[in-house]
Image (cartoon, rainbow, N blue to C red):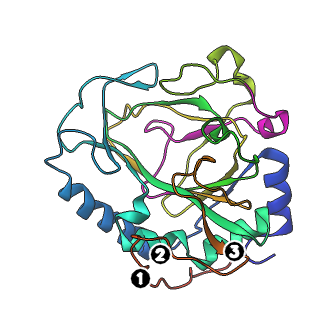
């Protein structure tokens, strides 16, 4: 084990998710938030989705439809590593890769990354789903890493999960506008709410049921999300240009991707 403990790995395998508090130090989180402020300022005049920058729309049942609520009010930056060297470096942060290796093995491919915004009073819900609904045709062995950049609370739409749901396999999803598990299937008595402090990391299995509620509070909530896969995909297999190998063999740089030019200090304090 490189970053996690055997008990943490056991918990992940049993429950389908694991929260590690204080995974990254506050200095790093502050730097990432400052970078997001820079990107958000640059998108302030944006009136429609463009280049991976998606705007917040009125929410109806978790579905994003209609015109954007306001110019520059972001909901998501997809493939954030293409827009920021700081986030590109975070994707390959050795502590993060060590933890993922502990969970899924020594061969790691980059799958995708994004930053999700839940603006105060406007952030919409993300319906119950399994990530594999979007990646069918691949082997369901990916792990998603969800980093809290702001405090995530029940009021501003923190993550909610169903422990052990990954062991039940894939279930049908409905509504092609935004794939989701029928609400009647969700076992409410088993749902766990997962509030998190900035710098804490949630790891969860690609088949784990999860959801986030709308943000009804006065505090916005941002998170960084990156997915890793032990199995590479070619173009047309759920990846736009194929996965990028990070560990387990020779790395091949992706054309047009900014070179990670930011080095981060190792997290301070004792490891979990």
Q: Main secondary structure of the magenta part?
A: loop
> In the image shown, does 238 or 216 lie closer to the viewer?
238
Pointers 1 and 2 in contact (C-beta within 8 Å): yes
Residue at (86% x, 57% y) in the render: 10
Task: Give the percent coordinates (x, y) of residue 174.
Answer: 60, 19
> In the image shown, does 67 or 120 lie closer to the viewer?
67
User: What secondary structure is found at the residue carrying circle 1?
Assistant: loop
**Mark toward the start of the polypeptide (1 vs 2):** 2
- Magenta-tinted stretch: 147-171
Residue 225 seen in render: no
Of the numbered discs in the image, which one, if any, rests on residue 89?
Answer: 2
User: What secondary structure is found at the residue carrying circle 2?
Assistant: helix
Task: Check the image and report above or below for 25 versus 197.
Answer: below
Task: Give the percent coordinates (x, y) of residue 88.
Answer: 45, 70
C-alpha separation, residue under disc 3 versus residue under disc 2: 14 Å
Q: Quadrant of residue 132?
A: top right
Task: Give the percent coordinates (x, y) of residue 171.
Answer: 74, 27
Image quarter in which the C terminus is found = bottom right
Q: Which residue is mark 1?
A: 262
Judge whether residue 151 is colored magenta. yes
């Amino acid at each position: 084990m490189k970053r996690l403990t055997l008990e943490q790995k056991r918990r992940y395998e049993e429950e389908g998710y694991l929260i590690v508090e204080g995974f990254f130090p506050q200095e790093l989180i502050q730097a990432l938030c400052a970078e997001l402020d820079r990107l958000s300022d640059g998108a302030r005049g944006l009136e429609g989705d463009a280049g991976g920058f998606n705007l917040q729309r009125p929410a109806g049942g978790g579905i994003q439809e209609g015109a954007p609520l306001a110019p520059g009010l972001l909901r998501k930056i997809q493939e954030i590593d293409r827009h920021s060297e700081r986030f590109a470096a975070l994707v390959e942060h050795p502590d993060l890769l060590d933890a993922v290796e502990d969970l899924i093995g020594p061969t790691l491919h980059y799958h995708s990354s994004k930053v999700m915004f839940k603006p105060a009073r406007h952030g919409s819900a993300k319906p119950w789903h399994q990530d594999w609904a979007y990646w069918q045709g691949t082997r369901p062995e990916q792990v998603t890493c969800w980093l809290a950049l702001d405090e995530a609370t029940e009021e501003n739409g923190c993550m909610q999960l169903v422990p052990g749901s990954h062991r039940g396999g894939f279930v049908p999803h409905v509504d092609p506008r935004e794939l989701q598990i029928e609400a009647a299937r969700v076992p409410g008595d088993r749902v766990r709410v997962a509030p998190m402090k900035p710098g804490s990391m949630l790891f969860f299995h690609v088949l784990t049921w999860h959801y986030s509620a709308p943000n009804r509070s006065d505090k916005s909530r941002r998170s960084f999300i990156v997915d890793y896969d032990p199995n590479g995909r070619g173009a047309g297999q759920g990846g736009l240009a194929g996965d990028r190998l990070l560990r387990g063999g020779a790395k091949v740089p992706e054309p047009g991707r900014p070179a990670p030019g930011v080095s981060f200090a190792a997290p301070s304090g004792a490891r979990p």
